[in-house]
Image: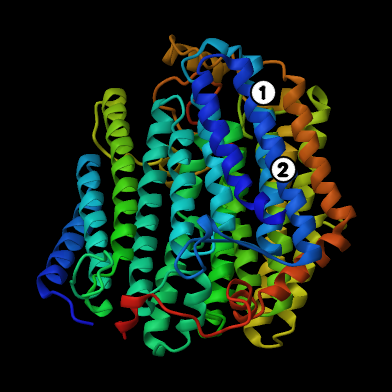
Amino acid sequence: MMATLVPLVVLVPLLSAALTLVLGRRARPQRIVSVLALVAVLAISVALLIGVDSDGAVVVEAGGWAAPFGIVLVVDRLSALMLVVSSLVLLAVLIFSVGQGLADGDDETPVSIYHPTYLILTTGVMVAFIAGDLFNLYVGFEILLVSSYVLITLGGTASRVRAGVTYIIVSLLSSILFLAAIGMVYGALGTVNLAQVAERVQDLPLDVQILLHVMLLVAFGIKAAVFPLSFWLPDSYPSAPAPVTAVFAGLLTKIGVYAIIRVETVIFPSPELNPALMVLALLTMVVGALGAVAQADIKRILSFTLVSHIGYMILGVALGTVAGTAAAIYYIVHHIVVQTTLFLTAGLVEREAGSTSITRVGGLLASAPLVAGLFFIPALSLGGIPPFSGFIGKLALFQATAERGDALGYTLIAGGALVSLLTLYALVRVWNLAFWRPLSDVEGDETRLLRTVEEAPNSTSTLSGTRSTPRLMTLSTAGMVAVGLALTVFAGPIFGLAARAAENLDGSTAYIELVFPGSIDQPALGVGEDVP
Amino acid sequence: MTVSLVLVVVMAVLIACGVYLLLERSLTRIVLGFLLIGNGVNLLILIMGGRSGFAPIFDESIDPSDYNDPLPQALILTAIVITFAVSAFLLALIYRSWRLANADDVSDDPDDVALRKGGLAMPVEEGGSSDGDTDFPAEVTR
């Protein structure tokens, strides 16, 4: 029963993508199909999570081929939890974009590719989370990246093409590095099956192990935007349409973090690189937060806080303890929800005020109190104010770090606390300027408008900025805020789940036992065996 | 593991040339660099499959260790398909970029340039976009 559900999380969005493509320009059926598909994916994921949590992980051998020869799909607690959170976020953002599309009256536009591409992105995300071997993970990454290339350049305006070029070239480079790493893993071990890699990697000389480890970390570090590989993110994310940015910011970087968790816990549980990762985590946090303070556009501020908060997750992974991994998992869940919500709110602000620059927007608390409330709660949560989920996640991370009891650990706690304050400062600045400041205080409003009209008389985008916000957009954002609050209210059970997921990831033996039950010694791939 | 030296040298040259081209500012050269590196990495996977041998079609008269390893070739096929799709998309993107800006360059991020010149400035957007993007000229705050 559970085994039949696993392939469905991939098949349902993939087939629906084909269906929406066939439906082409008929907007209403297209929307119905894609919303229904994501509801189905969410339901399947929830069923998988409940089943996996009570009965243990599910391993599916695709096509009936036995484990090291065929492709295995593995859903353990971590995978199932990520499936649920990501399908929830994907559904909320889809409803948001349907609301936006309906209000803009773009039923007749030639851009009928949004829904198919979005569903293929969903497919890629799901493949990446259930992949049981490295090459399948690579394929999952490629599916979601190729559809993200299309989504980030949607409409093909000049600014999007410019931002898209940066994003695409950087992503391509990380994919090539990942592919080269897979080639080297195969050369060294004669397999790409995660469990078998984990089993054999201990016999390698230490220098080869570290080489493979660093290759994989660099490839995933680019995707996860870990400093110094994070430069591309704030350049490319803000120019995409609001819902696209929201889903990219919430999910895509976290898939990189998920892959790093797998590498650190299953393939290389040994602690050689942990101190280096902790230093990188600190730098990611600090550099990202300082970047956020320097920006003047809400979307760019949020992009920089996204980078800085990746640092917290890397910190939890780098600790190499069960408590650290548990805190990192809870933090990922919290951050996916909260960061997506904030980007959706930025989309609402853009619609209400016609801009996301805090130098130009003002008085939103008076003119759009609902949007202000929807911004305020996730902002406090991201800044780590008690009792919200950000505080709980950070507290768990700091506790796990304090267990180390050395100078590096305490430096990281101090750095993490400082970064949390800087995040709060950046977000409070947005609050003060965009929401709290009366509109009359926005300086030089008329002159700027006049100058714009003089400089670009044909530009259509200056005055048509403010539009009424459709209820569906507000509703889906409010739904995400409610999910964020639920993460706070039900923090106990959710953290318990994260802790159980982390226990499964304590060392590689649990994962190997899962895929090859009973026997640690497995028949090897005939010819690959003569490889040293 | 015995490998062909020629293949290793070709792989190294392909990847070296590819990296050099990727560092250029012209988009066309970047695409060419990407193709070269992609093929270099495919060769890397092929080399990792070990020495050459018979096609892995079962035949009782052949000793199993004389077969070629088919798995790397399957991986390469997948990688080639992905590279093909991505390069088609990249070419379309370059064409679009050339149509829009008449330039084949990776341009600087306007926000970064504004920030480098000092102050919390907003950039001038090039080209009008239809969805209420930031279009006001630079204005220093506070």
Task: Please name the residue shown 27% across and 23% down the image.
Answer: B99
Task: Please name the residue shown 18% across and 72% down the image.
Answer: B52
Task: Please name the residue shown 30% across and 31% down the image.
Answer: B92
Task: Please name the residue shown 36% across and 40% down the image.
Answer: A165
Q: Which is nearer the eye, A265 or A321?
A: A265
Label 1 vs 2, first from the N-terminus: 1
Q: Which is nearer the eye, A225 or A186?
A: A186
The spot of residue A57 in percent (x, y) is 69, 65
The residue labelled by disc 1 is: A32
Q: Which is nearer the eye, A161 or B87?
A: B87
The spot of residue A179 in percent (x, y) is 36, 61
The spot of residue A306 in percent (x, y) is 60, 52
Local packing at callout 2 (Cα closer than 10 Å; few below 14, some 14-19, many 20+) is: many
* Whether residue B7 is situated above or below residue A375 in the rendered picture: below
User: Given the image, what chain letter belongs to the residue carrying mark 1?
Assistant: A
Q: What coloring was used for the rendering?
A: rainbow
Local packing at callout 1 (Cα closer than 10 Å; few below 14, some 14-19, many 20+) is: few
The quadrant in which residue A420 appears is bottom right
Please tell me whether mark 1 sits on a helix, a strand or a loop: helix
Disc 1 and disc 2: Cα gap in Å?
15 Å
The residue labelled by disc 2 is: A42
- Left or right: where does residue B71 sit relative to residue B1? right
Would you say residue B140 is visible in this rendering? no
User: Given the image, what chain letter belongs to the residue carrying mark 2?
Assistant: A
